[in-house]
Image: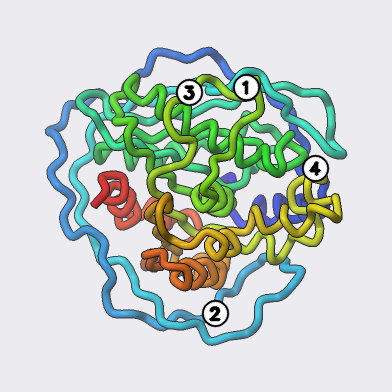
């Protein structure tokens, strides 16, 4: 199954980034928007309030991660501090959900670097929404690295999107050019995500969502990329002609990182993890690396006016992205005034953390501003 369900693709994707090769790209055009069709037609009553919302419980000592990450700079052997876990939750019966796939950009270049082929593609959303009612909270879920060499095959998180939407939220999962081989890199990768936020706000009402608050959820590689967008106060503005019309801010109003690969820069930065456009120029290398390092951004832009709520979760049994990466960002956030508190998802592996009821409840609470 595509990453984030398997460690293999993440390792390949990260190795590609470390070698500046990226992953081979090129994608077919995304079909025109289709009329949403219910994933389920069985009527159910409106969901009752989620009970036992996640909250810190007694801290549990966690052993150091046994991770297959191939770090250039091995993490030191340390005894990890206690980390609080999420409490059990009881979710309501899910409501019927519709699924739609719709482009949110014009045709853009989807290859580059050593894999330049001239391929063009449209980036698209996978949208999961309650079949009726609203207005619902709006969630933009930034996916992890793809198990395919094509932008069009980036994992759409259908099971996660349906699980969240079934509890009363509209979930938009964007494709984005994840590395130089896909036509992305710094700042294009982050501009694609910012574009998704702006287009989500403009089109939210179409799917019954409230555009006034966008909660971004980033998983794995998407946790790193999403955190960069969330912690950068000046929005990443897409290049002219690379994004459909937007509305409102291109930054999210809240961010949740789940099993995020936040240490990408620390461990792969010297190999120009995204693109030579910034990193390969010695005069701008340091600035470019700092601009895509969440911990450095937290230090550069301490919490204050313009900062947004940030929360972090990590699967207690994640063997793909080590817990140390979340601990590092959590420490940087705490040191700079952010109210983030890292919590474990009990018993969850790398992808299971996204499907856990506690994570769904945490997303809903953050999306509602609770």
Q: Nearer the viewer, mark 4 or mark 3?
A: 4
Q: Position of residue 351 (x, y in %)?
A: 48, 54
Q: Secondary structure at mark 3?
A: strand
Q: Nearer the viewer, mark 4 or mark 1?
A: 4
Q: Is label 2 in contact with label 3 (beta carbons under 8 Å)?
A: no
**Can you identify the residue that label 1 sits on?**
122
> Which color scheme is applied?
rainbow
Residue 342 can be seen, yes or no = yes
Q: Earlier in the sequence, mark 3 or mark 1?
A: 3
Q: Nearer the viewer, mark 4 or mark 2?
A: 4
Q: Measure the C-alpha gap from mark 2 to mark 1.
A: 41 Å
**Can you identify the residue that label 2 sits on?**
64
Q: Secondary structure at mark 4?
A: loop
Q: Position of residue 65 (x, y in %)?
A: 56, 74
Crowd class of label 2 (few under 14; some 14 to 19; many from 20; radius 10 Å): some
Q: Earlier in the sequence, mark 2 or mark 1?
A: 2
**Can you identify the residue that label 4 sits on?**
277
Question: Relative to residue 130, is residue 218 drawn left or right?
Answer: right
Q: Measure the C-alpha gap from mark 3 to mark 1.
A: 12 Å
Q: Nearer the viewer, mark 2 or mark 1?
A: 1
Q: Secondary structure at mark 2?
A: loop
**Can you identify the residue that label 3 sits on?**
101
Question: Relative to residue 219, is residue 9 drawn left or right?
Answer: right
């Amino acid at each position: 199954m595509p990453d984030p369900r398997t460690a293999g693709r993440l390792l390949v994707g990260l190795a590609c980034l470390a070698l500046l090769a990226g992953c081979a790209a090129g994608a077919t055009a995304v079909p025109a928007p289709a009329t949403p069709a219910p994933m389920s037609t069985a009527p159910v009553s409106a969901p009752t309030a989620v009970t036992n919302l996640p909250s810190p419980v007694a801290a549990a000592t966690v052993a150091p991660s046994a991770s297959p990450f191939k770090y250039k700079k091995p993490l030191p052997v340390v005894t990890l501090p206690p980390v609080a876990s999420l409490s059990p939750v009881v979710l309501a019966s899910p409501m019927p959900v519709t699924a739609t796939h719709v482009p949110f950009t014009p045709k853009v270049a989807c290859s580059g670097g050593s894999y330049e082929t001239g391929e063009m593609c449209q980036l698209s959303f996978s949208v999961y929404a309650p079949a009726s009612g609203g207005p619902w909270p709006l969630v933009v879920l930034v996916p992890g690295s793809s198990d395919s060499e094509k932008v069009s095959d980036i994992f759409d998180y259908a099971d996660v999107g349906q699980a969240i939407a079934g509890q009363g939220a509209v979930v938009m999962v964007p494709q984005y050019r994840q590395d130089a081989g896909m036509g992305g890199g710094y700042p294009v990768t982050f501009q694609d995500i910012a574009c998704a936020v702006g287009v989500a706000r403009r089109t939210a009402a179409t799917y019954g969502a409230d555009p006034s608050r966008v909660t971004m959820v980033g998983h794995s590689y998407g946790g790193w990329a999403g955190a960069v967008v969330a912690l950068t106060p000046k929005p990443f503005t897409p290049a002219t002609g690379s994004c459909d019309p937007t509305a409102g801010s291109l930054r999210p109003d809240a961010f949740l990182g789940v099993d995020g690969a936040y240490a990408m820069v620390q461990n792969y930065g010297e190999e120009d993890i995204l693109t030579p456009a910034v990193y390969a120029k010695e005069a701008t290398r340091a600035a470019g690396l700092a601009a895509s390092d969440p911990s450095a951004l937290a230090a550069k832009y301490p919490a204050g006016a313009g900062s947004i709520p940030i929360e972090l979760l990590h699967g207690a049994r994640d063997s793909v992205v080590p817990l140390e990466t979340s601990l590092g960002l959590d420490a940087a956030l705490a040191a700079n005034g952010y109210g983030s508190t890292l919590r474990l998802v009990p018993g969850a592996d790398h992808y299971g953390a996204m499907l856990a009821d506690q994570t769904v409840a945490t997303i809903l609470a953050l999306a509602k501003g609770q």
